[in-house]
Image: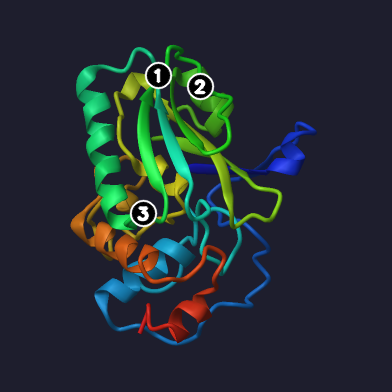
């Protein structure tokens, strides 16, 4: 897994800031993290998903995007297009539609996703509020993800207001491995990895060499708790604790 991130003001100048197995932001800045320990399963899912912390988090502290200690996602009220290539077969297109229906139910109107099939196969230049699927050969995986054998990666763009507000995302999957899942899309809406050994359910628990294509009920429940909480994107983990989201 590789996550790449760009700030939109830097995109204009053609600069990319690439993260290999790491959370975004300044790793030395612990402001906003809580030292309290959650005991409930859903709380631990929230901590892992939205902050990369707690017992369900990936032990390497990887697979997060954007600002550390802050909830990272698209701004409230946006319509986000999930763009699939022209050559996407009907079954794969329907799979994405069904998964995004689950996300729309979970976020309950915070934002809305819609699946669009492009007339093109090269979707490497997304517009604002778009996440694109790209299927590439081994050379393409090496170029975009830094690994010819990896399961996928996503290149994230952030709005000029800061790296907790997502602008867009470009995901890449290896065409020769036939992977078609929503793991990278999970990152694309702001979710971190879950430690598969601690809680092996759902697409965000996929690790290198494994492929869990769909969101699990536990993942969707944690997403719903956060997106219906009244909290704003950019809130800190400590603010989540104070609001009772991770008791």
Q: Nearer the viewer, residue 217 or 175?
A: 217
Q: Residue at x 43, y 34 (%)?
A: 81
Which SS class for mark 3?
Answer: loop
Q: Would you call the spot at circle 3 few (<14 residues within 10 Å), some (14-19), or many (20 or more)?
A: some
Which SS class for mark 1?
Answer: loop
* Vertical relation: 36 (above or below) 59: below
Q: Position of residue 64 (x, y in %)?
A: 50, 55
Q: Position of residue 78 (x, y in %)?
A: 48, 46
Q: Residue at x 46, y 20 (%)?
A: 138
| Residue 151 picture quarter | top left
Query: Where does label 1 land, which residue?
Result: 85
Q: Residue at x 58, y 25 (%)?
A: 125
Mark 2 vs mark 3: which is more N-terminal?
3
| 31 relative position to 129: left or right | right
Q: Are marks 2 and 1 in contact (CB under 8 Å)?
A: yes
Gap in Å between the C-alphas at discs 1 and 3?
Answer: 26 Å
Q: Nearer the viewer, residue 111 or 188?
A: 111
Q: Residue 109, which numbered label?
A: 3
């Amino acid at each position: 897994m590789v996550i790449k991130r760009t700030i939109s003001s830097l995109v204009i100048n053609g600069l990319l800031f690439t993260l290999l197995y790491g959370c975004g932001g300044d790793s030395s800045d612990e402001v906003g993290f809580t030292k309290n320990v959650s005991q409930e399963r859903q709380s631990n899912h929230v901590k892992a998903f939205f902050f990369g912390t707690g017992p369900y988090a990936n032990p390497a502290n990887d697979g997060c995007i954007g600002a550390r200690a802050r909830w990272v996602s698209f701004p409230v009220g946006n319509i986000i297009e999930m763009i699939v290539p022209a050559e996407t077969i009907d079954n794969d297109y329907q799979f994405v539609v069904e998964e995004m229906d689950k996300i729309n139910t979970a976020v309950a109107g915070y934002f809305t996703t819609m699946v669009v099939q492009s007339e093109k196969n090269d979707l490497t230049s997304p517009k604002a509020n778009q996440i694109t699927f790209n299927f590439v050969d081994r050379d393409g995986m090496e170029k975009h993800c830094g690994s010819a054998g990896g399961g996928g990666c996503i290149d994230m763009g952030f709005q000029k207001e800061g790296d907790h507000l997502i602008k867009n995302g470009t995901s890449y999957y290896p065409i020769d491995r036939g992977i078609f899942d929503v793991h990278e899309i999970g990152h694309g809406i702001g979710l971190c990895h879950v430690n598969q050994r601690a809680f092996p359910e759902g697409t965000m628990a996929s690790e290198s060499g494994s492929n869990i294509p769909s969101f699990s009920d536990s993942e969707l429940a944690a997403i719903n708790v956060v997106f219906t909480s009244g909290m704003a994107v950019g809130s800190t983990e400590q603010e989540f604790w104070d609001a009772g989201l991770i008791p």
